Amino acid sequence: MHDTGSAQMSNDATHAAVSREAERLIALERLDMLDAPKDEGFERVVRLIKDIFSVEIGLVSLIDAHRQWYQACAGIAVGEMPRSATFCRVVVDEEKAMVIEDATKDRRFADHPFVTGDAHIRFYAGMPLKTREGFTIGTLCAIDRQPRQFSGREERILEEIAGTVMDRIELLQFAATDGLTNAMTRRAFRTEAEGMVTKARRKAAPLSVITLDIDHFKRINDTSGHAAGDEVLKAVAAACRDTLGPDALFGRLGGEEFAIVLPGADRVASLAMAETLRAAILAQPLRAGLAPGPVTASFGLSTLSGANEDIDTLLAQADAAMYRAKHDGRNRCIAWNDVRPPRPASRRRRVVKAGTIIVGGEQPLVACTIRTLGEDGAGLKVSDAAEIPDAFVLVIDGEGREVSCRVTTRDRQRLDVSFSAAYA
């Protein structure tokens, strides 16, 4: 009886943890900050952390189902890390601050590669970033390569800075224009685009969505510096604005990713516009040394074809086509219908859900974050898409569902998959 009771308590605790994580990911999705463009306000925060606490590393991060993504980071040149490999996962799991004055003396981390390896992490202070509802969506961290003490006063200061970061996150929900490129922000773009799609469906009018991603942008940042990368982003945005007509909607969705809505444009017209934009970006004059070579972009497009489609579905389809353009050599335009044969569209809804990829043999399970989900497919984020085979089983955590998948398109960290059986 005792064993049965203990097992039931363990099952209840596991169920509660899974439910809490699902709610946390919903809270994260509502903020729409994952993979958002960098923000100078957060960059100032991490620089201040280094100066205030005299540490080598400061960071602001968000944590989804499979990774820790750095919204701002000073002192190390990384953009994200697998969630399982981070100190910050403990902060998220326990939903409270964590201070480690000497990681070599902490049994949880003494053998961690960040401690034993070249990173040489010794001191860590992580403060949870909490929504108003109390969900921990990420962390604010002060990190050093030397052991050090951290007073109660310093912990309170870090907590106050974390509150300021959350205030900034909330404030950004109301911004309409991206400060760097003057394109619409992701949230503002999506809101107006949804209205355009609804109007086009009601009038049975054509409408198309284009997504574009600057090719080898990381190489530009790595070889020429982030200031040069910013200049390239501004130049690409200017080329797009100068080319698009007054009725087009133009927004910045991510670091180097933009999207366009073309009301009144069918597949032929939108493909012609994508080709015009591609040529305009390639022809954009850039000062010497700004980029290691010509600046190009890859384009994907999707056209409204059914009453079930919304802006999330169209963006997911355009993204999948864009990933195929990347895979096929970059600096080209591909339409969704060329990736998947025309058929009745399945609406994709935006989500942030935990998923697990199961492959055959003795390969380990792979954690992923489900970003779009429909009856016939999904869009997934993974740490390394190259290690994922073309066919696998996807477990949708928290729902107890397993779906057989086949990869439709892939990019470095993104997969679009079709389901072999309908998901309900």
Image: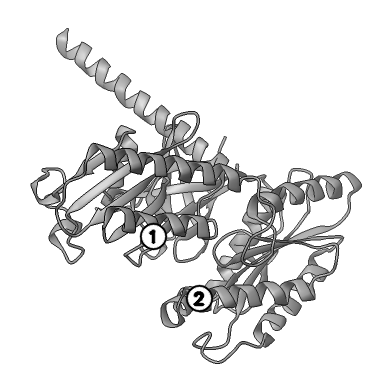
Question: What is the secondary structure assignment of the residue under circle 1?
Answer: helix
On the image, numbered disc 2 is attached to which residue?
Answer: 227
> What is the quadrant of residue 7 in the picture?
top left
Q: Given the image, on which type of amino acid does mark 2 rest? A: Ala
Quarter placement of the C terminus: top right
In the image, is residue 219 above or below residue 41?
below
Q: Position of residue 393 (x, y in %)?
A: 41, 47
Who is closer to the viewer here, 253 or 396? 253
Task: Specify whether residue 95 is in view.
Answer: yes
Earlier-in-chain disc, 2 versus 1: 1
Q: Given the image, on which type of amino acid does mark 1 rest? A: Arg
Quarter placement of the N terminus: top left
Taking the view exactly as shown, the residue that stands out farthest to the right is: 203
In the image, is residue 36 above or below residue 213?
above
Who is closer to the viewer here, 94 or 316? 94
Write the residue at 62% across / 54% down.
Answer: 316
Who is closer to the viewer here, 239 or 196? 239
Write the residue at 53% across / 49% down.
Answer: 33
Write the residue at 48% across / 50% down.
Answer: 405
In the image, is residue 191 above or below residue 80?
above
Q: Position of residue 308 (x, y in %)?
A: 74, 43
> What is the quadrant of residue 299 in the picture?
bottom right
In the image, is residue 117 above or below residue 168?
below
On the image, numbered disc 1 is attached to which residue?
Answer: 47
Write the residue at 88% across / 44% down.
Answer: 202
How is this picture coloured?
one colour
Taking the view exactly as shown, the residue that stands out farthest to the left is: 105
Name the front one of labels 2 and 1: 1
Q: Position of residue 403 (x, y in %)?
A: 47, 42
